Image: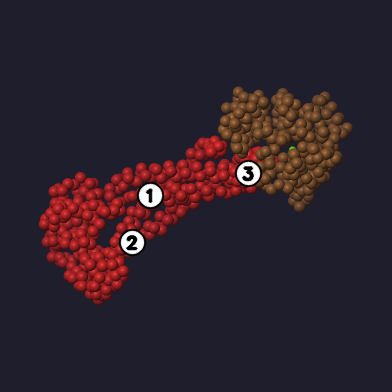
Amino acid sequence: MKFRRLILANLFRKKIRLILTIGSFAVALFLFAFLGVVRGAFNRGADVAGADRLVVIDRVSIINLIPLKYRDQILQIPGVKCITHNNWFGGVYQDEKNFFPQFVIDPENQRQVFPELVVPDDQWNNFVKDRQGAIAGARTAERFHWKIGDRIPIKTTLYGGGSWEFILDGIYHGQRPENDETQFWFQWDYFEERIPQAIKGQIGWYVLRVNSPDDAVRVAKAIDAKFANSPNETKTETESAFAAGWVKQFGNIQFLILTIGSVVFFTLLLVTGNTMAISVRERTSELAVLKAIGFSGRAVLFFILAESLVIALAGGVLGLSLALLAVPALAKALNGMLPQLVLEPSILVVGLFAALAVGIASGILPGLGAMRMRVVNALRRV
Amino acid sequence: MVRVDGNGGSQSLIRVRGLNKTYSRGGEKIQVLQGLNLDVDKGDFVAFMGPSGSGKTTLLNLLGGLDVPSAGSITVAGDEITHMSGSKLTQWRARHVGFIFQMYNLIPVLTAYQNVELPLLLTKLSGSERRKHVETALGVVGLADRMRLYPRQLSGGQEQRVTIARAIVSDPTFLLCDEPTGDLDRKSADEIMALIEELVAKYGKTVLMVTHDPVVAARAHTTLHLEKGVLVEGTASSRQSVLAGGAA
Ligand SMILES: Nc1ncnc2c1ncn2[C@@H]1O[C@H](COP(=O)(O)OP(=O)(O)O)[C@@H](O)[C@H]1O
Ligand SMILES: [Mg+2]
């Protein structure tokens, strides 16, 4: 395009200003991508939840235990396909900062309820036979360089305390990248054998699958109705509602992120809008000359918009590229504390469009002003 | 032939009839031009003089299609520009008018070459054709060896030459100069005037120029005075000012 040189020359008119403006875009877009990643990490549970899965917890608090004997009663409710139960172990491997979630599982039914977490059959069969056996998610196994057959001691202050020793029999992989690959599973029988008498026969929560997602609400109501007025009333939710409730424990993250994001973009708009206005105002007479020699108002508007769009694009690409580099590093540094930090392509696309929108918005007012400016008035001012 | 009595024939290149321009400032109306007539033929070189505020720039802006009159008509090479819409007028300017302002008004971030090329970007000329035209125009103004320089690397006189090259590069119908030497020292001013004279004599350009310098005006074929909103041909008082300017 033959106007390229004019647009570029105008861009590079004030280099410091150009760098600062591109920098503002880069910082804002980096922040945007980062917020998107954090939001994604918190919401992932709800996103990957099976629509046909229900979670049954104690009505008062998830930390209260519920009786194992509820299982058979739940299975009697029409529409329930299979059920498993879990306990939170909460132990420490070597050091506090090596956190990963440990679940006591029911080996007979775990795989039916969570088919997306895949364990090779031979490994699973060894695990089922091995009272002290354990299965680890691929990310956790990789993090600690565990191999099949390794002995893994886990200390706990609960359940009578002490160090529990497990043997790694298998490694599970998620079918989708969003699946949580950080969990550590071991057998209910081994757990129940070692815990104090008072809490034997008590599980943390049930997870069950219904025949069809359409049954979910009805089954959930039936379960809670069944145990109403018992010593352990239950609260049954779909897995996604459960995950959303889990996120809410951390405060209204969604709202916080939206607010921060809006403030960032609004500030960016003010900064770049002001910069574009100054940059156009200081060359009013040049723009007037362009119009005098035959450039149309629309051409002038186009030049200014092109300038602000190039700035937005350059800053946007820069910020998002930095995020692409930084997120994996950050995920590593966080040591798997959050389920999974992923910079999804949709974040990049939305970010780029948002940057371009800010680019247009910041160029449009000065651009329209220049387009409507009357040459004679502009030339008289000099 | 240049006439100001409104009796020029239809062959005039520029024909102005009954031109009025009124500004309103704070509710008060200022009549700047009041029934002005003018006929200019191809190849004429006209200087407009008059005291500050008499409407010289206003007249030039109207002739160049930068502003619209309150009444009257301007016809250039058979086209009446007074009824053209904004965008048609813009296209007309690109085709027919070369502007040379007092402030050189070059784009500081473009080289001399790129400044001169600007009007050609509005044409369908190819890159190599544009190059030929730009180099020719810069050759005419004697700056062929400076075309890679930026305006700030040029002297005032050289900058004004670049402006002239930009004004002639698309071979417009006529040139409008508003105090082209107003910001220059005598020597540079003389050189610029010699260049404009050459454009008229050698290349047959039609030039309309505003100046308040009688020495500069004396270079034109005809000097017209703007008095009370109309043009009059050389008067006793103006001849005196020419003498005074010459003696100074
Ligand atoms: N946009 C405008 N609004 C109001 N008055 C104007 C405007 N432009 C010019 N004038 C007035 O018109 C008169 C002629 O101005 P101008 O054509 O610039 O004179 P000259 O070029 O001869 O000095 C002056 O009195 C000036 O103040
Ligand atoms: Mg003037």
Residue A40: quarter of image: bottom left
The mark that comes first in sequence, 2 or 3, is 2
Q: CA distance from mark 3 to mark 1?
A: 39 Å
Place of residue A124 in the rendered image (x, y in percent of width and height, measured from the top left): 16, 55
Give the left or right position of residue A373, taking residue A266 as reference.
Answer: right
Please state the horizontal and vertical placement of residue B15, each as a whole percent of the image: 79, 40
At a point 84% along the width and 27% down the height, the residue shown is: B243
Element marked by disc 1: helix
To the question of a shared chain for discs 1 and 2, the answer is yes
Image quarter where the N terminus of chain B lies is top right
Q: Are marks 2 and 3 in contact (CB under 8 Å)?
A: no
Dot 2 falls on a residue whose secondary structure is helix
In the shown orientation, is residue B70 left or right of residue A371? right
Residue at point 75% right, 44% down? B80
Q: Which chain is brown?
A: B
Q: Residues within 10 Å of mark 2 (few under 14, many from 20)?
A: some
- Residue type at mark 1 is Pro
The number of discs equals 3
- What is the letter of the red chain? A
Same subunit: marks 3 and 1: yes
Q: Which residue is disc 3 drawn over?
A: A296
On-image quarter of the C terminus of chain B: top right
The residue to which callout 1 is attached is A345
**Of the residues shown, which amino acid type is indicated by label 3?**
Ser
